[in-house]
Image: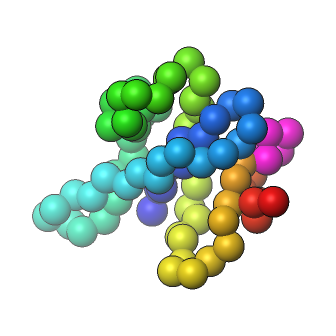
């Protein structure tokens, strides 16, 4: 079930989480980078953003996350 994390390429801050569901099957659908960025707040500078595909499932009350820019993995924010 792909989920997409849109993050700032300069500091790894996550600015958007994205999933697209197929209403018939109830499963998530793969998206292109362009499709994900198309739904991000238009006030954000897309040149500073990147998209990470992940299987991560956020849990309520979980610690803040960010993207480690060296490994392109999710880590607990500091």
The picture quadrant where one finds residue 37 is: top left
Q: Assign the magenta stretch its main secondary structure.
A: loop
- Indicate the position of residue 73 as horizontal and vertical percent values: 74, 52
Specify whether residue 38 is in view. yes
Of residues 18 and 21, the one drawn nearer to the viewer in this rendering: 18
Q: Identify which residue is drawn at 60% across, 48% down.
A: 14
Residue 72 left/right relative to 37: right
Q: Which region of the structure is painted magenta?
A: 68-72
Q: Identify which residue is drawn at 69% across, 31% down.
A: 9
Q: In this view, does 74 lie above or below 42?
A: below
- Which residue lies most toward the left here? 24
Q: In this view, does 76 lie above or below 40?
A: below
- Indicate the position of residue 18 as horizontal and vertical percent values: 41, 51
- Indicate the position of residue 72 as horizontal and vertical percent values: 75, 44
Q: Identify which residue is drawn at 60% across, 24% down.
A: 48
Pick the quarter of the image with the N terminus. Answer: bottom left
Q: Is residue 35 magenta?
A: no
Q: In this view, does 4 lie above or below 22?
A: above
């Amino acid at each position: 079930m792909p989920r997409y994390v849109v993050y700032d390429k300069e500091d790894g801050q996550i600015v958007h989480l994205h999933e697209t569901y197929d209403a018939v099957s109830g499963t998530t659908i793969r998206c292109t980078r362009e499709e994900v960025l198309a739904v991000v707040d238009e006030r954000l500078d897309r040149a500073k953003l990147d998209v990470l595909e992940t299987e991560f499932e956020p849990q309520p009350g979980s610690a803040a996350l960010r993207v480690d820019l060296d490994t392109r993995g999710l880590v607990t924010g500091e």
